[in-house]
Each structure stands twice: as structure tokens, then as C-alpha cells.
């Protein structure tokens, strides 16, 4: 099991400073409740907006477009982790680069995400980039502990606030860490290790306050193999991305919103043109994810479908020459193609 990473003197000072500031915010909130004009209380949306602005102004920020030194071809693994009715994807390349997209469900008592990270990264190991597609508790669930237990270099969020305690704890953890904080937008790119990350959404010109619809949609490439990850974005967002003329074709598609019928629309599937699809969902979940209609869209097109509820953790292994294979924790089937 992961161990809590010891805070440096700088981190402790930052933590204490922000504790004082948050106490001040709380006091201001209570005073506003008691003495605000016309009995009106503090606006929660404004409070969280201010909080996010503090992150942007105090935390170190990356420049756009992002860029690191490009490396040559190298083997990689993309692990779609079995975290129940939540989402977490770990991408690793041969040079030791680690990218984590989402952190599982907040009420997973087994803390499976931490067990996986200990196994594949090592206790207290480095995560070069932590991407929260959006701020629902089944996507940021163990973000707080991961930021405390592991050496996270950079964090991406979509910038749409929520008022959940899980989200508050994640913000606190980012402030307490040495991680860079960034809110990327459509058109941004980043090269990290052997990975090339393209941000397809949100669109800064048309952003709303709907955290699902403003999910960070990314296409992550290595050795010519692309993985499309769209969080909980709906078919409306998928269509908008296509209409904006952004390249979306990918060998692997992660089904939007755990396989909901309102995502992974027919036009999106046609444009992405995946060779295989993956969904992340818990067995016998109350939402009935993945929905039968969604599965049929892929099967009618002859696209193999793998899911964590059926197969456990799903591992995509990518060779230097661009060939890849699928390993399943359960049922042992393999789907592969040659270069």
C-alpha cells in the first residue's frame, strides 16, 4: 500500500499559508450569511471560482503550447485500470514516463487505484502528468491521496468548478504539492517522453459550466498508435469536435461516460474509426453501463469491445514498430494487429 509522501519545508509553509487563507474565506462566508444585504449568503460559485483563480495565480503553470524534448520510438503500455464504477487509465513508456488520466471512484473502499500505482509505478514514484478529465467524484476520487503519496509533476483540469468535498480536497492537495497546474484548451499539445498529447476539447470560445460537457478530450499518440479519451462528454461534444475539423482518427477509443448511450455516437465512431474500444464500468452498476445500444454501435461495425467489468484491467502493449496487442486480466483473449 502507498505511503504518504513526507512534506518538504516549502510544502508545509504553503499548506499552512493556504489553511490560513481558507479559514479567512470560511469566516467571510459565515459573516456573509449573518450580515449580508437582504439576508443573501455568499455565492458558492464565486467562492469556488476564487479558489481556482488562486490555483492559477499561485501554482506554477505550464506555457502553451506545451513542449518537451522529443524522444525516439519506445515500447509503451496503456492500462485501463479496473477501479469499479469509475475511470482511471495509466500510460507508461519505456523511458519511465508515467501519465495518469483520472483517479477512480471516491467510495472505492479497496483503494484499488493505489494498489495499481504501487505495482506499476512504485510506492511514492513519479507521475509526470495527472489529467483529470472533469471533476465528477468517480473520476477524481483518489486524486487527493495520489497527490500526497506520489511525486506528481503536473496536473491538468478543465476549470469547471463543483461544490463537492472530493473536489475541495483535490484542490487543497494541488496547493500543498509542488505540481504545476494548468487548464489546457482545444489546440494545445504536449510531448512527454514518447507520448504526443493533443487536446481536442474544451473549446475556450464556447465553454459552459457543465463539467461533463467540458471534459478534457485528448488524443494520446505513441509510435503511431492513438488512444482517444473523452471523459463524460456527450455526443453533442463529439460532433462539435468533428465539426471543428480536428483530427480524431485513433486505433483505440475509450467509450465516453462509461459506455452511456448518450456518448460514443455513430458519427463519432465513424470519424475516430477505432480498431478496438474500451469501456470502464463496475460490474452490476446501478446505471447499467455500458448501455446495450452503445455496444451495438461498435459490434455492428465489427469493432471488438473490451470492458473492465467483464475483463478486469485491460493492458494495451505497443511495440516500437507500432504493432500492439491486448492483454486481459480475465478471459485471456488477445486482439492484435501487425505493423
Image (tube, grey):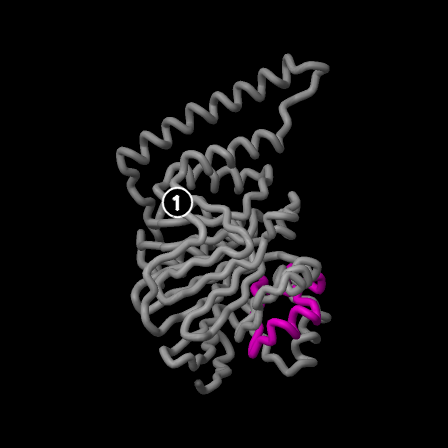
Query: Visible in this render: residue 207?
Result: yes
**Few, some or many residues within 10 Å of mark 1 (<14, 14–19, 20+):** many
Residue 35 spot, x, y in % from top left: 64, 12
Q: Which residue is mark 1?
A: 180
Q: Is residue 129 left or right of residue 281?
A: left
Residue 172 spot, x, y in % from top left: 45, 37
Label 1 residue SS: strand
Q: Is residue 298 left or right of residue 253?
A: right
Q: Is residue 164 left or right of residue 314?
A: right
Q: How many marks?
A: 1
Q: Quadrant of the C terminus?
A: bottom left
Query: Visible in this render: residue 119?
Result: no
Span shown in magenta? 259-285
Q: Quadrant of the N terminus?
A: bottom left
39 falls in the magenta region? no
Q: Looking at the image, is 178 positioned above or below residue 250? A: above
Residue appearing at x 51%, y 64% in the figure: 219
Residue 162 spot, x, y in % from top left: 59, 40
Q: Looking at the image, is 226 positioned above or below residue 240? A: below
Amino acid at each position: 500500500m502507498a505511503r504518504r509522501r513526507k512534506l518538504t519545508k516549502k510544502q508545509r509553509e504553503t499548506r499552512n499559508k493556504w489553511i490560513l487563507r481558507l479559514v479567512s474565506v470560511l469566516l467571510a462566508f459565515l459573516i456573509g450569511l449573518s450580515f449580508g444585504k437582504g439576508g443573501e449568503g455568499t455565492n458558492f460559485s464565486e467562492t469556488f471560482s476564487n479558489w481556482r483563480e488562486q490555483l492559477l495565480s499561485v501554482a506554477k503553470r505550464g506555457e502553451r503550447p506545451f513542449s518537451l524534448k522529443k524522444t525516439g520510438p519506445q515500447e509503451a503500455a496503456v492500462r485501463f485500470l479496473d477501479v469499479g464504477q469509475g475511470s482511471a487509465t495509466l500510460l507508461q513508456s519505456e523511458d519511465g514516463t508515467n501519465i495518469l488520466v483520472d483517479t477512480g471512484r471516491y467510495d472505492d473502499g479497496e483503494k484499488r487505484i493505489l494498489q495499481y500505482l504501487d505495482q506499476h509505478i512504485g510506492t511514492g514514484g513519479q507521475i509526470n502528468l495527472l489529467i483529470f478529465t472533469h471533476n465528477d467524484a468517480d473520476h477524481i476520487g483518489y486524486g487527493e491521496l495520489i497527490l500526497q503519496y506520489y511525486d506528481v509533476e503536473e496536473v491538468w483540469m478543465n476549470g469547471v468548478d463543483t461544490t463537492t468535498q472530493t473536489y475541495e480536497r483535490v484542490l487543497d492537495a494541488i496547493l500543498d504539492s509542488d505540481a504545476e497546474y494548468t487548464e489546457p484548451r482545444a489546440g494545445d499539445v504536449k510531448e512527454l517522453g514518447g507520448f504526443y498529447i493533443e487536446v481536442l476539447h474544451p473549446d475556450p470560445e464556447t465553454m459552459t459550466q457543465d463539467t461533463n460537457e467540458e471534459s478534457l478530450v485528448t488524443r494520446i499518440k505513441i509510435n503511431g498508435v492513438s488512444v482517444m479519451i473523452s471523459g463524460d462528454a456527450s455526443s453533442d461534444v463529439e460532433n462539435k469536435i468533428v465539426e471543428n475539423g480536428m483530427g480524431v482518427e485513433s486505433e483505440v477509443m475509450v467509450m465516453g461516460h462509461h459506455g452511456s448511450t448518450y456518448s460514443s455516437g455513430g458519427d463519432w465512431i465513424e470519424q475516430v474509426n477505432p480498431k478496438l474500444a474500451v469501456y470502464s464500468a463496475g460490474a452490476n452498476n446501478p446505471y447499467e453501463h455500458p448501455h446495450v445500444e452503445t455496444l451495438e454501435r461498435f459490434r455492428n461495425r465489427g469493432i471488438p469491445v473490451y470492458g473492465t467489468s467483464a475483463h478486469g484491467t485491460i493492458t494495451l502493449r505497443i511495440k516500437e514498430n507500432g504493432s500492439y496487442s491486448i492483454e486481459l486480466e480475465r478471459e485471456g483473449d488477445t486482439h492484435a494487429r501487425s505493423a
